[in-house]
Image (cartoon, rainbow, N blue to C red):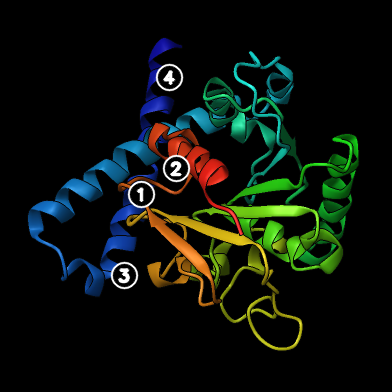
C-alpha cells in the first residue's frame, strides 16, 4: 500500500513535466532570445514548482473547510480583498496565499467560489458582481474592494469590474497567470466553461467579448514558463493602462503558493493606486 501511494505521488509530481516541455517547444521563438543556461534553469524551476503545486492542490482540494481557519489578524490593514480562483479549482486554492498575506498585515481577506462545470462566463460575472457589492456593503461602503484573480479568475474580476456600478466600488484588480487572449489548450478542456477559453471563442472575439475596466488600476502578474496558457503572448493584456509584472519562472498553479508572488500581490495592494 505504501509503495502504491508513493508511486501515485511520484506520477502526480511528474505529470506537468511533458506539458511544460511542450509549452517550451511551442514558444521556441521566445526561448531563442535567452541563453541555453537560462532556459534550462527556468524550465527546471517550472517543472519542480508545477509538480509540487499540483500535488498540493490535488491533496487539499476536497478540504474547503480549511478556508474557514481564522486569520491571525496581524497589522491594521482592513481594506477588503476578494480572491477569485481559476478553472476547476475552488476557494482552498488561496489557503497559503491568504495566510501569508495576513502575516503581512492584511486582515480583511475573502474568497469566492464557483462551479467550473455547470455554468458559463456571463453567468459567473453576474454572480461575482453580487458578491463584490455584498462585500462592499459589509464593510460599511467606506473602503473600495481590491480584486485578485488567478487564471480564469482574472478574467472574471475584469469582466465584473468593467461594469460601471462595480468599477465605482473597486480600487484595483490584480491578475495572476490570466489568459487575456485565451489558450489553445482550451480545445481539450472538459466542460463548456473550459472550452470557452479557446482564443477563437466569443469571449475574445466579436461584440460579446470580455470587457475590461478603464478607470481603475490594473496589474497583470505573469510567469515566463506558464504551461497552461499557450502561446505565452496570450498572457499579456493588449488593453491600455495595464501594469505587467513578470515574476520568476514557475508553473501556472505554482503562482498560488509562491512567496515571491504573494509579496508582489501585497505590494500591488499597498502601493498602486489610480
Q: Which mark is residue 26?
A: 3
- The reply to whether callout 2 and callout 1 are in contact (CB within 8 Å) is yes
Give the residue displayed 76% in from the left and 82% down from the top.
208
- The reply to whether callout 3 and callout 4 are in contact (CB within 8 Å) is no
**Which comes before the other along the chain, label 3 or label 1?**
3
Q: CA distance from mark 3 to mark 4?
A: 34 Å
Q: Which mark is residue 247?
A: 1
Q: CA distance from mark 3 to mark 1?
A: 20 Å
Which secondary structure lies at badge 1? Answer: loop
**Which comes before the other along the chain, label 3 or label 4?**
4
Which secondary structure lies at badge 3? Answer: helix
Q: Which mark is residue 132?
A: none
Give the foreground label among 2 and 4. 2
Q: Residues within 10 Å of mark 4 (few under 14, many from 20)?
A: few
Residue 259 sits in which quadrant? top left
Give the residue displayed 9% in from the left and 61% down from the top.
35
Nearer the observer, 54 or 66: 66
- The reply to whether callout 4 and callout 1 are in contact (CB within 8 Å) is no
Q: CA distance from mark 4 to mark 1?
A: 36 Å
Give the foreground label among 3 and 4. 3
Give the foreground label among 2 and 1. 2
Nearer the observer, 98 or 87: 98
Give the residue pinned by disc 2.
Answer: 264
Give the residue pinned by disc 4.
Answer: 4
Amino acid at each position: 500500500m505504501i509503495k502504491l501511494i508513493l508511486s501515485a505521488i511520484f506520477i502526480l509530481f511528474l505529470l506537468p513535466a511533458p506539458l511544460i516541455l511542450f509549452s517550451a517547444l511551442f514558444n521556441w521563438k521566445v526561448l531563442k532570445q535567452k541563453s541555453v543556461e537560462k532556459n534550462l534553469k527556468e524550465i527546471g524551476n517550472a517543472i519542480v514548482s508545477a509538480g509540487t503545486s499540483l500535488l498540493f492542490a490535488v491533496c487539499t482540494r476536497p478540504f474547503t473547510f480549511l478556508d474557514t481557519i481564522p486569520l491571525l489578524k496581524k497589522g491594521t490593514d482592513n481594506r477588503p480583498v476578494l480572491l477569485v480562483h481559476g478553472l476547476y479549482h475552488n476557494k482552498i486554492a488561496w489557503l497559503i496565499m491568504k495566510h501569508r498575506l495576513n502575516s503581512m498585515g492584511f486582515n480583511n481577506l475573502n474568497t469566492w467560489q464557483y462551479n467550473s462545470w455547470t455554468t458559463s462566463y456571463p453567468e459567473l460575472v453576474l454572480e461575482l458582481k453580487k458578491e463584490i457589492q455584498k462585500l462592499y456593503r459589509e464593510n460599511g461602503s467606506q473602503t473600495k474592494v481590491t480584486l485578485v484573480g488567478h487564471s480564469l479568475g482574472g478574467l472574471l474580476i475584469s469582466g465584473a469590474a468593467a461594469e460601471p456600478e462595480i468599477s465605482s466600488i473597486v480600487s484595483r484588480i490584480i491578475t495572476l497567470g490570466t489568459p487575456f487572449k485565451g489558450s489553445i489548450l482550451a480545445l481539450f478542456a472538459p466542460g463548456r466553461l473550459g472550452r470557452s477559453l479557446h482564443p477563437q471563442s466569443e469571449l475574445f472575439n466579436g461584440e460579446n467579448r470580455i470587457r475590461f475596466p478603464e478607470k481603475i488600476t490594473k496589474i497583470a502578474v505573469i510567469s515566463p514558463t506558464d504551461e497552461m496558457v499557450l502561446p505565452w503572448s496570450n498572457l499579456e493584456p493588449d488593453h491600455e493602462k495595464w501594469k505587467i509584472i513578470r515574476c520568476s519562472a514557475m508553473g501556472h498553479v505554482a503562482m498560488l503558493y509562491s512567496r515571491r508572488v504573494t509579496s508582489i500581490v501585497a505590494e500591488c495592494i499597498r502601493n498602486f493606486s489610480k
